Image: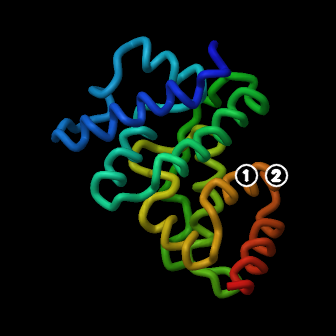
Amino acid sequence: MDHYNFAQTFRQLYDKAVTLYAKGQRGAESYFNAEELAFLASNGITAQYLYDYAEDKNNYDDPSYDIALGIELIRRDYFLNAQLGVSSGKIADADTWPDKTAAVKGIEWLPRILPKVRAKLRGELPASMMYCCGGDRRFFKTNNIHPVEFLNLAWRHIDDDNAIIDWVAARASQK
């Protein structure tokens, strides 16, 4: 595995996905060849993650490449160091997550994003879900939180919702 050139290779695949989406090609499974898929898998990344970035980049011009890279660097680090390069083999059940309008400490979306951010960190997001989707981005912007910062926060407090909630509430109050 070429760790040193990870960002360069990721950029090539990101750009490829954005271009293919812009040309009208749909379906994450059609974007990458076997070698590219092997690179993604060896870094704990799925083709669906890149497809989602390409879709939102083309439709909303957000998230940027820098945000996508930052998110996937955190995911990659967790995959290689906490999961020792082995996928959990699980897929989170998004139907069990709190409703989009649920709030804690007056902060909407926070109860919903807690299981979602952990699913992203562990590589367990269902294909129908994207970390840093439009709803997530609204939450991040409203509460002055960078998406990469939040993913890292979730890793630091992997089993402690209260620590994350308190941190978000403190950050939101600084706006």
Left or right of residue 45, residue 81 in this image = right
Residue occupying image coordinates x 63% and y 74%? 144
Residue occupying image coordinates x 55% and y 46%? 92
Find residue 118 and report its horizontal and vertical position in percent. 66, 50
For residue 156, the mark is: 2
The vertical placement of 95 against 40, above or below, is below
Left or right of residue 139, residue 76 in this image = right
Dot 2: few (<14), some (14–19), or many (≥20) neighbours within 10 Å?
Answer: few
From the image, which quarter does the N terminus lie in?
top right
The vertical placement of 133 against 54, above or below, is below
Question: In which quadrant of the rendered view does residue 51 lie?
Answer: top left
Residue occupying image coordinates x 73% and y 86%? 173
Residue occupying image coordinates x 72% and y 73%? 168
Considering the numbered disc 1 on the image, is that residue within a helix, a strand or a loop?
Answer: helix
Q: What amino acid is found at the position of numbered circle 1 in the picture?
A: Asn
Whole-angstrom CA distance, mark 1 to mark 2, is: 6 Å
The outermost residue toward the left is 24
For residue 61, the mark is: none
Pointers 1 and 2 in contact (C-beta within 8 Å) = yes
Q: What amino acid is found at the position of numbered circle 2 in the picture?
A: Arg
Considering the numbered disc 2 on the image, is that residue within a helix, a strand or a loop?
Answer: helix
In this orientation, which residue lies closer to the viewer: 87 or 66?
66
For residue 152, the mark is: 1
Find residue 137 and report its horizontal and vertical position in percent. 50, 66
In this orientation, which residue lies closer to the viewer: 47 or 127?
47
Left or right of residue 33, residue 10 in this image = right
